Image (cartoon, rainbow, N blue to C red):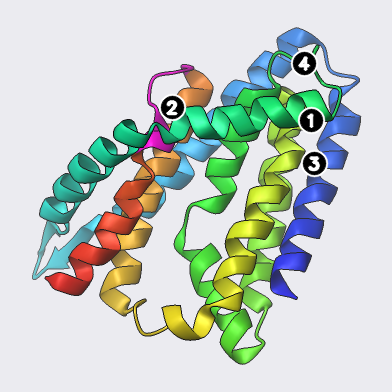
């Protein structure tokens, strides 16, 4: 139920953004895209700082640095080896053809950027597990409201490709909900904190790419999230 609500709100936001985007000039769209990138960048930065900075007595200290280095190093190597970025872009190109959007040069970029923004994060996993185990869809409903705003803004600037991020959200969160019983013991507090930290840094990378395209191959860093969870469970 939670994933359905999330997807519905996401699509609603996308349709609102698409309707509004028709009346926006290219200059304003470019500004909106950079503004969206700035917002996504700071969402990622805020999440990173929240998990990485701790108060040690009266001093400010950092935590999780070793985990970050290991996760991103191994995760990026794995991602580059299997070239996840190309696979996701190919999916975007396929959707572009199937939806008759060949004339939309931003379609694939919009799909990839938005999918990464709304799929990565602890809320998606925790909310899906809560939905599957307890029937509590409140976290996913809240995530859906946030996604609605984010996708609305991104669609106004990047176009209809953003709306199709609903597909990976439905598959990703729906799968976690179905297998919530098996995943629940793995998602310890430490694992969720590590996942959230790495996920926030990936969202930061998405924001940078919206401002300066192709700076990071963010999709190829996605295995870092899995490595972070494994690291937390082992150490």
Of labels 2 and 1, earlier in sequence is 1
Left or right: 61 as drawn, with respect to 211: left
- Which residues fall within the magenta stretch? 212-220
Residue at point 46%, 31% (across, down): 85
What predominant SS class does the magenta segment belong to? loop
Check whether the beta carbons of the residues at disc 2 and disc 4 lie within 8 A of each other. no
Provide the secondary structure element on which disc 4 rests: loop
Q: Is residue 185 above or below residue 191?
A: below
Residue at point 65%, 30% (across, down): 92
Which of 90/117 is in front?
Answer: 90
In 3D space, how far apart are the residues under numbered discs 2 and 1 (Cα atoms)? 21 Å
Residue 213 painted magenta? yes
Of labels 3 and 1, earlier in sequence is 3
Left or right: 54 as drawn, with respect to 42: left
Residue at point 31%, 67% (across, down): 193
Residue 50 in view, yes or no: no
Residue at point 47%, 46% (across, down): 43
Q: Give the residue pinned by disc 3.
A: 14
Of labels 1 and 4, earlier in sequence is 4
The label shown at residue 172 is none
Q: Nearer the viewer, mark 3 or mark 1?
A: 1
Of labels 2 and 4, earlier in sequence is 4
Check whether the beta carbons of the residues at disc 2 and disc 3 lie within 8 A of each other. no
């Amino acid at each position: 139920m939670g994933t359905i609500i999330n997807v519905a709100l996401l699509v609603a936001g996308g349709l609102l953004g698409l309707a509004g985007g028709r009346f926006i000039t290219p200059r304003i769209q470019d500004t909106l895209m950079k503004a969206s990138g700035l917002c996504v960048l700071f969402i990622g930065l805020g999440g990173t700082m929240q998990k990485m900075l701790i108060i040690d007595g009266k001093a400010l200290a950092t935590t999780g640095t070793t985990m970050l280095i290991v996760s991103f190093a191994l995760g990026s190597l794995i991602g580059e080896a299997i070239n996840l970025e190309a696979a996701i872009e190919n999916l975007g190109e396929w959707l572009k053809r199937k939806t008759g959007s060949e004339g939309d040069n931003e379609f694939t970029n919009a799909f990839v950027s938005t999918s990464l923004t709304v799929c990565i994060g602890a809320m998606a996993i925790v909310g899906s597990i809560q939905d599957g185990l307890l029937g509590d869809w409140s976290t996913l409903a809240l995530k859906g409201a946030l996604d609605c705003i984010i996708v609305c803004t991104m669609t106004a600037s990047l176009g209809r490709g953003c709306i199709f991020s609903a597909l990976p959200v439905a598959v990703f969160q729906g799968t976690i909900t179905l297998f919530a019983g098996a995943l629940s013991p793995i998602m310890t507090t430490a694992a969720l904190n590590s996942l959230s930290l790495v996920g926030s840094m990936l969202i930061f990378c998405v924001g940078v790419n919206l401002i300066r395209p192709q700076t990071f191959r963010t999709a190829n860093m996605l295995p870092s999230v899995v490595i972070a969870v494994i690291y937390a469970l082992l150490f």
